[in-house]
Image (cartoon, helix red, strand yellow):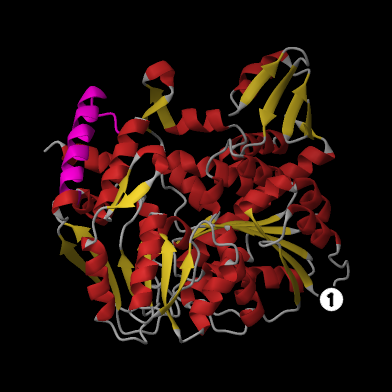
Amino acid sequence: MDLTFAKGVFTIPNPIAEFRSLLGSVPNSRWDSSKIAWVYSSSAEAKKLLLLFCENGLLKPTQDAKNELIEMRDQIQLQNSVRGIKQERSVEVEVPLKVELFQHQKKAYKIGITLSRLGLLMEQGTGKTLSSLAIAGYRYNRGEVKRLLIVAPKSTLRGWEEEITNFVDYPVEVINLGNSKGKKKIQLIKQTSGDNRALKIILINYESVWRIYPEIEEWSPDMIIADEMQKIKNPRAKQSRAMHKLGDQVRYKQGLTGTPVSQGPLDIWSQYRFLDPDIFGKKFYEFRDRYAVMGGFKGHRVVKFQNLDELSMKAHSIAYRVRKQDTDIDLPPITNQYLYCTLGNEANKYYREMKKEFTVTLNENKGNAHAPIVLTQLLRLQQITGGFLPVEEGKIVQVDSSKLNLLTEVVSDLPLDKKLVIFARFLPEIEAIKEEVTKLGRKLVTLTGKTKNRGEVISNFQKDPKLTVMVAQIQTGGVGLNLQVADTVIFYSTNFSYIDYDQAKARIHRIGQVSSSVTYIHLVSERTVDEQIFEALDNKKDVADYIVDHIQK
């Protein structure tokens, strides 16, 4: 019986009747009555059995099918060798960089030059950027990669450009498309020279990939690095689908993230669909049904998860996980401080009225924390603790200054030359913080969702000793930035995401931090939702659910 392979699908036409039950036992198989054939998706489990059938003479593969099965067999052998690398106590390798790597980075490099598809699941601050650039350099020096596409959040592109400029020890030509408009991006891509005297690198943000997908596809990268890979965890998002299509055309791929799972295990599928679809297949619902039990209204809610040991084993077969405590990095100790203030009478009155309304809404919704109105009221409570009251037509007025006064006290007690980062959630808070910090005679920079020249702002803060304060919106400044020139962070307010909070902390507690200690100062309005927010974050829990559980106590 023949085994064919085309467009990612194996097919056995006109199978012998006595073997139909055997052929139907292969995972991800289906009978196509119109073709009178068994059809198999290109999953690792299916390939293993099909390869076994071919070796035993049951199937006769076409050349394309044979090549696909041999590549899978070779990949499995490489994955087995990677297990050995992970167990090595010491790794000595020469890397194409101008700096020495830590042991865990050398392991990442050795694994990366072994596997063509790799997930670097390394926590923030453990140096995954340099590891990935070293791997790219190895591939370039061997003639395997001539064009490298680096896709990352827009706020991190300047950081990538600086890392490349300062640390790689191989010739490069870098085009940063982060601050260019659509037509200009296309023009820059087309102007990329075709010679091989340097590795051509294009830096682009995720949102732009699907917008200019045809031009990127035509540019034809040999390798893709997806930084903060969790940005494509939603399989229905346009940027995720674009990355899936690009990934199908590229041999060498890396996915970098310290937080591959933020909402739940199902986050894994879309990221691995890009990285290596053989691991979990190309069909999300088959993956979901394997690892989750659905229930609730019309069966659309995950009731529980299953087969998670298998999921973890498969995910780690092409991944290298690094946590800070597992490294040989000598990072300074952390100090967490919680400083308290009390809302003034007027703000307290507004807060109690809002909280009463919140509790009534919870009761009406039977504790459903995901009702939009509940989340909106929770957000409004938090705005009041920062000193601001949302009123009709989206207008916000300042009703209290207790937390601002506390911030002023904290900042005024710090040396004028000490660099610090202040995180806040809301734009009115950021404007008020800017005004207070300026009154103290400090020069500052701000980073919000509206900031256009993010790379320049970050670079100025890092290099200019007169700029001692960065005021950043936590949703924007909490991802992929190197701010270790500071050793103190003040959390004026946070959003409800533990991931954003943890990544914000990692902006200064990372490789390159030379201070003897790192301090996180949390400003808390007493007897308000602030206390539950920081308690939830400290316990690594979802804030909204946690607060709903406690608000009625």
- 136, above or below 290, in the image: below
- 432, above or below 213, in the image: below
- 15, above or below 200, in the image: above
Pointer 1 residue: 197
The span picked out in magenta is 347-369
Foreground residue among 408 and 308: 408
Label 1 environment density (alpha carbons within 10 Å; few <14, some 14–19, many ≥20): few
Q: What is the x, y in percent for residue 215?
A: 80, 51
**Image-based side of 249 in relation to 304, left or right:** right
Residue 159 seen from this side: no
Q: In which quarter of the image is residue 141?
A: bottom right
Q: In which quarter of the image is residue 284?
A: top right
**Image quarter in which the N terminus is found:** top right
* Amino acid tagged 1: Arg
**Image-based side of 551 in relation to 55, left or right:** left
- State the residue at coordinates (78%, 16%): 35
Residue 139 seen from this side: yes
Foreground residue among 19 and 64: 64
- Disc 1 is placed on an element classified as loop
